Amino acid sequence: MKRVVHAACPHDCPDACGVLITVEDGRATKIQGDPAHPVTRGFLCAKVAKYLDRVYAPERVLYPARRVGSKGPPPQQTKTRFAGDPGPGAGWERISWDAALDEICERLRGINREFGSEAILPYSYGGTLGVLNGASMDRRFFHRLGASQLARNICSKTGEVGLVSVLGRKLGTEPEQFAQSRYIIAWGANIHGNNVHLWPFIEEARRQGAKLVVIDPYKTRTARCADWYLAIRPGTDAALALGMMHVIIRENLHDADYVARYTLGFDQLRNRATQYPPERVAAITGISSEDVVRLAREYATTRPAAIRMNYGVQRAENGGMAVRAIAMLPCLIGSWKEAGGGLQLSTSGAYPLRRDRLERPELMLAALGRPARTINMVEIGHALAALADPPVKAVFVYNSNPVAVAPDHNHVVQGFARQDLFTVVHEQFFTDTTDYADIVLPATTFFEHKELQTAYGHYYLQVSEKAIEPVGECRSNFQLFSDLAERMGFTEDCFKQTVDQAMDSALDLTHPWLAGIDRARLEREGHVRLNFHHGDTETPTENESPFLPFAEGGFPTPSGKAEFYSESLAAQGLDPVVAFVPPTESRHSPPARTYPLELLARKADNFLNTTFTNLPAMQQMEDRHLLEMVAADAEPRGIRDGDRVRVFNSRGEIELTARVNGSVPPGVVAAQLDWAKLSPQGRNINVLTSDRLTDMGAGATFYSVLVEVEAVSGRERP
Ligand SMILES: Nc1nc2c(c(=O)[nH]1)N[C@H]1C(S)=C(S)[C@@H](COP(=O)(O)OP(=O)(O)OC[C@H]3O[C@@H](n4cnc5c(=O)[nH]c(N)nc54)[C@H](O)[C@@H]3O)O[C@H]1N2
Ligand SMILES: Nc1nc2c(c(=O)[nH]1)N[C@H]1C(S)=C(S)[C@@H](COP(=O)(O)OP(=O)(O)OC[C@H]3O[C@@H](n4cnc5c(=O)[nH]c(N)nc54)[C@H](O)[C@@H]3O)O[C@H]1N2
Ligand code: SF4
Ligand SMILES: [Mo]
């Protein structure tokens, strides 16, 4: 029997594609984009187009397994192949689910007794962004246990805090509206690589004469397609935005009416912008003063103008202020009034789901009588290796690969290698993190479970149906934590909820944006756009009409206005307006800085963080283990294209192959994130990154890293 099932891609990507899976006799035989989805319109990225390879990969984790060998990566000869059914010598023995759950419960109970419940730490991030499998039963379980809380700040927190400080909420321009823009700035946004479904809308705009400007220190595929590419120095975006505001205000190009009605603190902003004349901005950013002036004039006068900012800007140490500065631009020129204007960083703040009902934070208060202590996931290396107080004695990892993705890799490895640490990893593959697990549990893919799906790059809500039965003995996150709760003897009703019941409880139909969008309708239609009300109006606008969240102000900030001046930042001891403060690790840092080159430890276009890095079809699409640099930095170091180089700083070192290709500006080098055990010397680029936190939101600083590079001579290739 053949049927076609509607699903939604849950990977950590703004697009949340509508997907159609063909199933024949219980086996998925084809995957394609859903042509009916108004934003993702029938195509998939290269990664997910080959998803059958992932679902049916021979290396998938299929059964629970218990470590029999020592912790750490497997020996070289078994480096790339890990049988899902671990055979003798693989370092694992297959165990039953009953045995696995019993052992986990016994260990957690013991640790709880001896060290307290906060010695247990969950660690999860973006494996699936599905509403239920991302954060529901898992949170209930750890709250009920009284476990430590995890601050999930590794990706977007800084940008969120920066954006919200101006706009009040994570709302932005709909992707569909970019087709109507006449001026588009991709600002730290690698659209071709990371948000490919926006591209056709941009192309549509360009056919009607729109100009695309890309601001990125790395010459991405997106930059190569741009009408104008500005190679900004890393971590200097706040200065560029301030320079633009300087020109816009000086030349009276701002929208005085919009500013007067809907913004707060214009006078303070004007004073601040005065301090950033184009010449000063040029010296900071590496963009000429003529270009700063031209960008400001074009942006303010070519309408509608939209900014697609992505998360690249906010991975700098001063990223909060940078996002804040950029978010002020559309408020200054009033472009929120126009379809095809405004700015998009994320749309995720639009979904009025009842997260409280899914996560049940009150269970933690009942268990502990107070909120549990919080550990920042960015600092996991130090929390484990330097022994937080009370010490972390158990880590439960799901939806994440911390040994590969967390900064300061050497500390992370040192922490996870602790023999006294009890580590459980729920995974689809034997990753860098399972190498340090005591117990590995098999996880379903989105083909194998039902899910509710939001997006962070558009405004559609979707139901993703289960297409096939779980392969092997895989269980979804939702089921795993429900099963564990039962085994722990947790009797609260919420642990017995079915997937459908949990979905229903999340869908708050009393909220106007969700009115009429119940599960039955989502199941029937697959995807439904949120119904937006503008301002305070009670009647939903026509569903086809453009969503203009701030056309008439209505900013959900404390003042109800776009805040160029923020009391709440002042209260936190931060600059209440906005300023450029150079990152500690940057060319602008004090002369005593020890390492001369700025490193961008980037994502790959054909991987998703470290997901997909182990699949041969994806590996073939990437040139891996390269250090990209310009001739001006290579030659003085005696480095030629293709040479082995040692890249190092005080935190670590890694050997890569030099690629002298002009993708980076002088003074900047770039390399890709990959699995450590698939990289030279078994370590990845995060040996060089730092767990220093950002200015706002305590986020990660992956793009504020200084290194030195030298040629490796007369040494064996690793
Ligand atoms: N193919 C693919 N798609 C992905 C991902 C992936 O790994 N691969 N990851 C997903 C995830 S988790 C996320 S958060 C999103 C992220 O999507 P993006 O925000 O687009 O992600 P990044 O690649 O981190 O950063 C975007 C660009 O910012 C540039 N950049 C770095 N530093 C600076 C700076 O100081 N100023 C400016 N102006 N630009 C800078 C980088 O060179 C990069 O090209 O993408 C998601 N989609
Ligand atoms: N150097 C450097 N480091 C970075 C970044 C960078 O740009 N450069 N990017 C940072 C960013 S933006 C992010 S978001 C983080 C990402 O950090 P993570 O969210 O840890 O990302 P992944 O490496 O993709 O690991 C996700 C894992 O979840 C597993 N998984 C998928 N679905 C499920 C499921 O349903 N259940 C379970 N249990 N597991 C599942 C996948 O197999 C995969 O191994 O990395 C950060 N690290
Ligand atoms: S990873 Fe992104 S682009 Fe690819 S299918 Fe999933 S949502 Fe679509
Ligand atoms: Mo991310």
Image (cartoon, grey):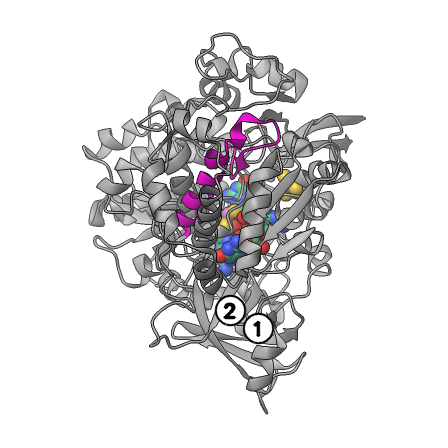
Q: Which residue is mark 1?
A: 680
Closer to the camera in the image, 403 or 448? 403
Q: Is residue 433 visible?
A: no
The extreme front residue here reads 251
Ligand 3, image quadrant it occupies: top right
The answer to whether residue 139 is above or below residue 53 is: above
Q: Is residue 221 left or right of residue 322?
A: right
Magenta part, dominant SS: helix
Q: Secondary structure at mark 1?
A: helix
Q: Position of residue 32 (x, y in %)?
A: 76, 36
Q: Which residues are magenta?
A: 319-347
The answer to whether residue 229 is above or below residue 446 is: below
The answer to whether residue 304 is above or below residue 647 is: above
Q: Position of residue 127 (x, y in %)?
A: 53, 44
Question: Is the residue under label 1 in contact with that under label 2 (CB below 8 Å)?
Answer: yes
Q: How many other residues sit within 10 Å of disc 1, few (<14), some (14-19) or many (≥20)?
A: some
Q: Position of residue 428 (x, y in %)?
A: 57, 47
